[in-house]
């Protein structure tokens, strides 16, 4: 198990990185109004924050995803992406349980992209949150720029 | 700051710069110029020369699209004579009865009863969406609106009508419509009923000179 662990963690880094690279890239290639419309349906998010989230979040997702795969600032990136997943879980749960609504939008999880239901998104987010936390708690990562630079 | 950290920060900044430039380049390649919408009289309502033109890409089986209907009605009520609205078919892959619903609605359009049929579809969406087969229900709607049932029945199986619907959806896809409802108000994009209700309405008021 000790021999496999570094490779498993590397796979985990690549998986989590790819999820967020895809998420960020898809948002950046689309008109920003598409993401803005999606966020507006989550009435639990204060409207004043939405334009800022639309402007900044996709870049952070993409950059953190790339950095995670390359193993640069691995722990902060893993923590950030884990936190992002947790935030979405909280928003989805609060929307459903507190406000009693599901976000109204059809196709928002992938008409023209990877198609996921809200339940599938939740499952993926829980997994990503957990995986990100494990990666954050790992001090040194196999085949990472962090490790390479620390040896120089 | 240690030398290692300095190197990491420099590398990060350099990489981030490459990412931003790269994405900026891909975005510029990705977003083409769109030409104006072609108006369709059978699926357009309101004043033909109205200063505000709304084009809606919508799916009859989409709950969010049903939710947008009262918002649209309110716009017509609040700004009479100033709104022209055109419907565009955008049946989503995940909605089982959407293709049939859109085919029937397009057939109603060919007998100049599109909006009546459209309103009925949304009003009874929860009922027909869960049926094993809503064909009889859709035929009943046609009967209720005094449509020529032979013509309607032939039309429902007509591949040219299906091709028309597919073409409208492709137009939406080419305009990067990803979800429904998506509205273009004088070519400005607003996605979802909440956006239409807030920023969309604000945009309309500005265009009509009712707000600065």
Image: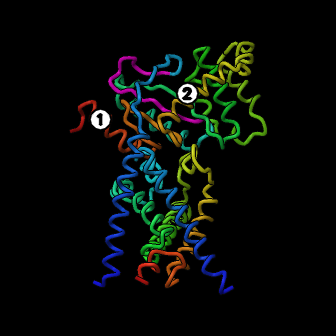
Q: Is mark 2 on a helix, strand or loop?
A: helix
Residue lying at 47% horizontally and 35% vertically, measured from the top left: B175
Q: Are marks 2 and 1 in contact (CB under 8 Å)?
A: no
Q: Give the chain letter at badge 2.
A: B
Q: At 44% across and 24% down in the image, what residue appears?
A: B37
- Furthest-left residue in this view: B212
| Label 1: chain letter | B
Residues at marks 2 and 1, CA–CA distance in whole angstroms: 28 Å
Quarter of the rendering occupied by the C terminus of chain A: bottom left
Counting other residues with Cα less than 10 Å from the Cα at mark 2, is it few (<14), some (14-19), or many (20 or more)? some
Helix, strand or loop for disc 1: helix
- Residue B144 higher or lower than A2, as above or below: above
Q: In this view, does A94 lie above or below B123?
A: below
Indicate which disc, 2 or 1, sits on the residue closer to the N terminus.
Answer: 2
Q: What stretch is highlighted in magenta?
A: B44-60
Report the residue marked by disc 1. B205
Quarter of the image where the N terminus of chain A is located: bottom right
User: Looking at the image, can residue B170 be seen?
Assistant: yes
Residue A35 in the image: state x and y as whole percent. 44, 50
Q: Residue B34 location, x and y as percent?
A: 41, 30
Residue furthest right in the image: B132
Q: Which residue is drawn at 59% across and 19% down?
A: B109
Query: Is A7 part of what is drawn in magenta?
Result: no
Q: Is residue B126 left or right of residue A103?
A: right
Q: Please name whichever residue, A120 or B112, is drawn nearer the observer in this view of the structure.
A: A120
Outermost residue toward the bottom in this view = A2
The front one of A17 and B89 is: A17
Q: Whole-percent x and y of residue B151?
A: 71, 13
User: Would you name the residue on which mark 2 appears?
Assistant: B168
Q: Do labels 2 and 1 share a chain?
A: yes
């Amino acid at each position: 198990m000790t021999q496999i662990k570094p490779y498993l963690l590397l796979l985990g880094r690549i998986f989590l990185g790819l999820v967020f690279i895809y998420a960020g890239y898809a948002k950046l290639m689309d008109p920003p109004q598409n993401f803005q419309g999606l966020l507006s349906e989550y009435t639990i998010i204060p409207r004043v924050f939405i334009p800022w989230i639309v402007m900044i979040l996709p870049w952070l997702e993409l950059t953190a995803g790339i950095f995670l795969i390359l193993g640069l600032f691995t722990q902060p990136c893993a923590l950030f992406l884990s936190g992002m997943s947790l935030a979405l879980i909280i928003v989805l749960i609060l929307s459903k349980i507190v406000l009693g609504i599901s976000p109204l939008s059809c196709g928002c999880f992938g008409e023209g992209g990877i198609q996921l239901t809200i339940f599938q998104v939740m499952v993926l987010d829980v997994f990503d949150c957990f995986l990100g936390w494990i990666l954050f708690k790992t001090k040194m990562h196999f085949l990472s720029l962090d490790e390479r630079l620390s040896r120089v | 700051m240690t030398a290692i950290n300095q190197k990491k920060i420099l590398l990060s900044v350099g990489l981030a710069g490459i990412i931003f430039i790269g994405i900026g380049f891909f975005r510029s390649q990705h977003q083409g110029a769109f030409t104006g919408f072609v108006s369709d009289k059978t699926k357009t309502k309101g004043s033909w020369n109205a200063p505000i033109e709304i084009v809606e890409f919508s799916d009859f089986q989409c709950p969010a699209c049903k939710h947008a209907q009262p918002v649209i009605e309110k716009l017509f009520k609040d700004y009479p004579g100033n709104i022209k609205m055109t419907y565009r078919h955008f049946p989503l892959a995940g909605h089982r009865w959407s293709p049939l619903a859109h085919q029937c609605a397009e057939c109603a359009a060919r007998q100049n009863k599109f909006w009546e049929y459209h309103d009925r579809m949304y009003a009874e969406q929860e009922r027909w969406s869960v049926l094993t087969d809503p064909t009889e229900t859709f035929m009943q709607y046609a009967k209720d609106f005094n449509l020529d049932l032979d013509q309607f029945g032939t039309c429902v199986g007509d591949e040219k009508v299906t091709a028309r619907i597919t073409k409208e959806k492709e137009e939406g896809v080419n305009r990067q419509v990803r979800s429904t409802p998506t509205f273009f108000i004088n070519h400005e994009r607003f996605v979802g009923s909440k956006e239409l209700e807030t920023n969309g309405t604000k945009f309309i008021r500005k265009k009509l000179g009712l707000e600065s």
